Amino acid sequence: MSTNSKSDKSLLVPDEEIEGGLQDALYKQLLLQAAEAGHLDLPGNEGQEPISKLVTPEPGFCVKTKDDQGNKIFVNICKTEHMPAPKDISDEDLVKLLQSDEPDFRVPLSIGEPHAEVDKGGKGCTAYDIAINSEFYNKIGTSDLFKGFFMSVVIEGLETKYNILLDKNWIQLKNKKCHGVITEHNIRTKSKPRISEVGEGSIEPENPSLSSSTTIPASSKPLITELESSSVVTSKAPQPEYVIMREPLEGHPEFLVAEIKLPKVKSAKLLTLDLGEDRIVLHAHPSAYYLDIYLPFYIMQEDSGAQFNRDTKVLTLTLPVKPL
């Protein structure tokens, strides 16, 4: 998920500062697991279905708001059949979810890059394109409740991704499907990363420096790109402790390694992991932990590996970095 978010590179910690820092063997193992799962473009994977595709969504409707500096902001709500649809629930179900202690309703959406435009008065403004599933687009067109909920998700997503503040009192423009030219979106076509699980029950590895593992799907749900810019109703679960390391230490890194401590988690089956181009979203069900952070470098999420150790209760992510 390309973004101009202001990420803090102080999140990165050199390996030697972390007790029991990961070694090359573990990096290679996780990358190999990603390749075996079909996520990594290595020799032998040629001819497989692309991980993602470029799509130009169809314009739907346009809303106008402003940022905290008073600048005009236009948000183009677009539709495409290439985006996954959220779970089909009724208005009553949505009300119950929003009133629950741990609401968990995901809206798959893709947040495009900001593009400079001019308003009808000739003054400069900014427009953003949001792509959603065509069927879900039809649903919010017939339900004020779903449209209000959806727009709150969109506003929150834009604020989080681009580190901006937007007026929540948006206005839908009449007879206007979009402002400016709709841009292409890079939408994922394959499922999310798989989490492998290691522990006492693992088979003894041939190489003692590597742990064997049983691969477990992170979730049967379709991946949200951008996550597909995955948006989740705000979770009240605590944020786990984590550290992010880089390799090599100097220059542009080849990959990042994230270690996330999850002492309350017993199995990888309880974890839902979403990766964007510069974002990690992790939910430990039902409400053990929730992590949503941006990374200081763009990563190749389709090449990434994930491993949960049942003994240490640590989830390790190996995240190859996009070259310059």
Image (cartoon, rainbow, N blue to C red):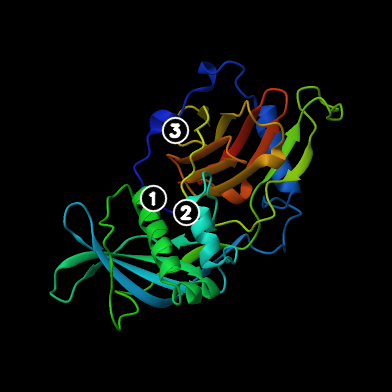
* Picture coordinates of residue 148, whole percent (x, y): 39, 64
Q: Quadrant of residue 180?
A: bottom left
Instruction: Give 282 or 8, whichever is nearer the viewer.
Output: 282
- Calculate the distance from the C-alpha at mark 2 to the C-alpha at mark 1: 9 Å
Q: Nearer the viewer, mark 2 or mark 3?
A: 2
Q: Nearer the viewer, mark 2 or mark 1?
A: 1
Is residue 228 something that shows in the picture? no
Residue at the spot of label 1: 161
Residue at the spot of label 3: 251
**Callout 1 secondary element:** helix
* Picture coordinates of residue 195, whole percent (x, y): 69, 41
Q: Residue furthest bottom?
A: 175
Is 53 displayed left or right of 47 in the figure? left
- Calculate the distance from the C-alpha at mark 3 to the C-alpha at mark 1: 25 Å
Which class describes the residues within 10 Å of circle 3: few (<14), some (14-19), or many (20+)? few
Is 78 displayed left or right of 74 in the figure? right
Residue at the spot of label 2: 1
The first of marks 3 and 1 along the sequence is 1
Q: Quadrant of residue 147?
A: bottom left
**Callout 2 secondary element:** loop
Q: Amino acid at mark 1?
A: Lys
* Picture coordinates of residue 228, whole percent (x, y): 52, 58
Instruction: From this view, report whether residue 302 is shown above or below residue 65.
Output: above
